[in-house]
Image (cartoon, grey):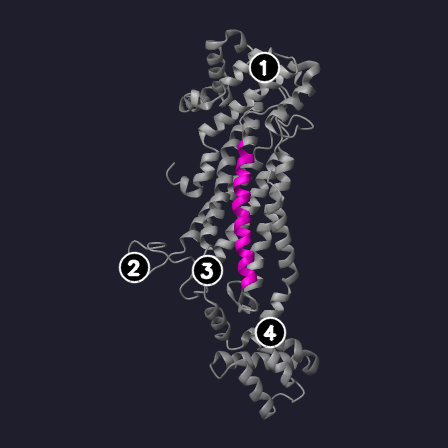
Amino acid sequence: MLFEAFLSSTAMESVFSPAAVVQSMMDVEAALARASARTGLIPAPAAQAIASLCRAELYDVPALVAAAPRSGNLAVPVVQRLRETVALFDPAAAVYVHRGASAQDLIDTAMVLRTREALRLLDDDLQRLCARLLELAEAHAAVPMLGRTMMQPAQVISLRYKVMNWLMPLLRSAERLRGQGRESLLLQLGGAVGTLDAMGERAQDMLAAVAAELSLAPPDMCWHTQRDRWLRLGLEVGLLCGSLGKLAQDFALMAQAEVDELNEPPGEGYGACSSMPHKKNPVAALQAMAAVQRAPQRVAGLMGCMTPEHERGLGQHQAELAEWGGLMGGAHAAVEALNRALAEPVIRLDRMRAHVLERQGLVASERLEHLLLPRLGRQRTGAVIRDLIHRVRQGQGTLEQLLHAAIDVGDLPPTALSADELAAMFDLDAIAAQADGRVEALMAQARQRLDALAATPCV
């Protein structure tokens, strides 16, 4: 569908395209045939004949997809057409096509193969995004900016602190996706009811042989109805989508013209509006936010598929399949969009400082309260601070100016605040440096963790 494509990426669409999925199903059939020959279940010439015809380009993929609803799944028409084609060249070999396997074995293992490619794609671009964020943090030391809570001005933080707040969940997702991928990307081979009854005493050898053919780990048990490991991988992708959405939303808020602290790279027509030439829309952030918008519903859809009846369910597997590619596509589309936004972002350090200064020192109110409480007591401290805040908001001066005046005229005792304490309270660079200090060790750890990811292959 036209607008569905906007929520995915071209690369991920290719990973889960009908031709790619059918080819993976063919790869599973070829591996099954070769493993069957190796374990003595079928003649070697038959395996060779089958494997030689397991090429998706030999088949009418749209016709196979169109035939799937009549059978309840895509595996039935794929196996039938493969069997018919093998029979044209080697009728004796045709009887060994798909021997001992089930339709769900074929589809699940094909989706494992497709998901392995999807995770590699996602891993590469997620690493790139994490690296860009870390480089942004490393390049900007002690930059004061306004921290905001409940969508309102709060206190002074630093740009480095904010960027690390974006980075760390993404880095954890990169690591968790690899770990969960290793646990989830397992061969599915159980036969009709999961026991591999048709393979008899050679069942365990077949599991090992097919797994080796496809470079997959064999499962401890058939997982036709044990969807927990598989769906944990989907949940990890869902969590990644949430973190990407948070970054995209913050980026968009900072790109608002009245904020103008961070914006997407300049470019002719990039973010242009159809009717207002002066506008520059944050389209990369928009694309990322749109791409992850349905992730919660997709994750909920996956969770709803965890109740298959008995040894194989009725409808849950098909519904699960329909959510899977969309979830992966949304995550990758968001990563791609944010990589574009952060390739050469426009960073306005002057605007960050200006927004702090516009608060007229009120961002220091908590620090002031902590200093005055032990010296003036709670009741008087509260009265003094409420009066000062009111006067600042009335335009009578900044909080720093009013504090100096209060001490000069005796409204505050000289012992209430020392000159050093007053200066430190409004030293934006020192406050930003303190915020930086909260993540200094974390930055070094993040660099090591990113280097470790780069040095080892994904699943």
Segment colored magenta: 114-139
Q: Residue at x 61, y 82 (%)?
A: 422
Q: Which mark is residue 253?
A: 3
**Residue 454, position in %: x, y?**
59, 46
Q: Can residue 287 be seen in this view?
A: yes
* The quarter of the displayed image where residue 428 is located: bottom right
Give the Cα distance between marks 1 and 2.
64 Å
Give the Cα distance between marks 2 and 4.
41 Å
Q: Which mark is residue 99?
A: 1
Magenta-highlighted stretch: main secondary structure? helix
Of callouts 4 and 1, which one flags the residue occurring earlier in the amino acid sequence?
Answer: 1
**Residue 314, position in %: x, y?**
55, 25
Of callouts 2 and 4, which one flags the residue occurring earlier in the amino acid sequence?
Answer: 2
**Residue 297, position in %: x, y?**
51, 41
Give the Cα distance between marks 2 and 3.
20 Å
**In this orientation, which residue lies closer to the viewer: 318 or 116?**
116
Q: Residue 337 carries which label?
A: none
Q: What residue does disc 4 label?
A: 430
**Residue 18, position in %: x, y?**
45, 29
Q: Is residue 378 visible?
A: no
Dots 1, 2 in contact, CB < 8 A: no
